[in-house]
Image (cartoon, rainbow, N blue to C red):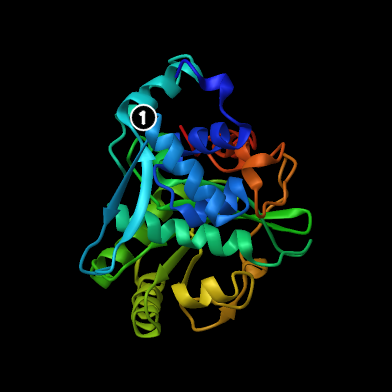
Amino acid sequence: MAGWSALPLRDRRLLEWLFMGDLVTAQMAALLAYGHLRVAQRRLARLAEYGLLRGFWSANSQRPRGRYAYALTKAARAGLAQLIWDGELSKPARVEAPSPVIHQLATHDLLVAILRAPSSREAYLAGWAPERAIALAFSGYLRPDALAVIGVADRAVELFIERDLGTERGAILASKARAYSSRLSGHQVPMNVGFVVESARRAAALAYRLRHWLTEYELPGHGKAPCWVTVSDELVADPYGEIWRAPDGRRVSARDMASFQPQWELPSLGPLSLLTDHGPAALDDRLLRAVGDLGRNVWS
């Protein structure tokens, strides 16, 4: 990391984000920091030449065509831990890669779609914490795939994202709703849980299970975390539309979810967010510190 200060700002911001974000494609890097795909491809290749990134091809049965992605090298991750956090934030280096590559990229696709979507004061992305940051915050007790903070005028919706590629049985997904409720429902600020699945059929089946869970499962002294289901194609096409299904069959948008009055300034995130003043802190573990400033003991 001896030449860190000589790197362009956009390179440094992307490398810092990768400490928590784990993976990036050229398309995503263009959206976050570079502006154009060819520029992103050249810079990622150059960072790989420097030994800061490694590029690789990944595929599985769900995505047989595969994706080409980049991740920090072990040396770069260790160097960033010392250079940026002065060794203080050493725990994330010991958190295992949260999910398989294809699964993480599928979750990143949701972030890309939301960043690209037209926003307004009535609905905009104000924060997104990746899986590694949340796994660290919860000490592995809960491992959602992401935390999205949606701004709704001057209010905020906190939405935990569970990305499903069809590899888990519906009963397992429904059991996650119980885990979220047991951990989150006693807090004064509402926390929503959003399941993003691959097909309308799977969405309907999961909503059915959640509906039965709502009527049968009781958590003494607590309510239940609001749970919502949507199909990935619908979210990608219109992130702020009425794409979420409630267990009772209602269709709602993020604006209709349980919200609260935040005690921190909400940034509005979009393309090239890593180059803005507030964007980097709203896209990594620092978002969780802002959430913690609400006075809740959620993250301890």
Question: Where residue 215 sits: x, y (%)?
Answer: 40, 74
Left-right relation of 160 to 217: right
Viewer-closest of 90 and 259 = 90
Image point (38%, 27%), residue name? 77
From this viewpoint, which residue is outermost toward the left? Answer: 61
Can you say whether 181 is above or below 167 in the image? above
User: Could you say which quadrant of the image residue 72 lies in?
Assistant: top left
Question: Where residue 4 sits: x, y (%)?
Answer: 52, 21
Can you say whether 50 is above or below 227 in the image? above
Q: Secondary structure under badge 1? A: loop
Question: Where residue 80 sits: x, y (%)?
Answer: 44, 23
Can you say whether 86 is above or below 124 in the image? above
Viewport quadrant of the N terminus:
top left
Viewer-closest of 105 and 65 = 65
Q: Residues within 10 Å of mark 1 (few under 14, many from 20)?
A: some
Image point (29%, 48%), residue name? 56
Q: Amino acid at mark 1?
A: Gly
Question: Where residue 139 sits: x, y (%)?
Answer: 35, 35
Badge 1 is on which residue?
51
Image point (39%, 56%), residue name? 105
Left-right relation of 196 to 172: right
Instruction: Confirm whether residue 231 shows in the render.
Output: no
Instruction: Confirm whether residue 93 shows in the render.
Output: yes
Can you say whether 73 is above or below 197 in the image? above
Left-right relation of 67 to 185: left
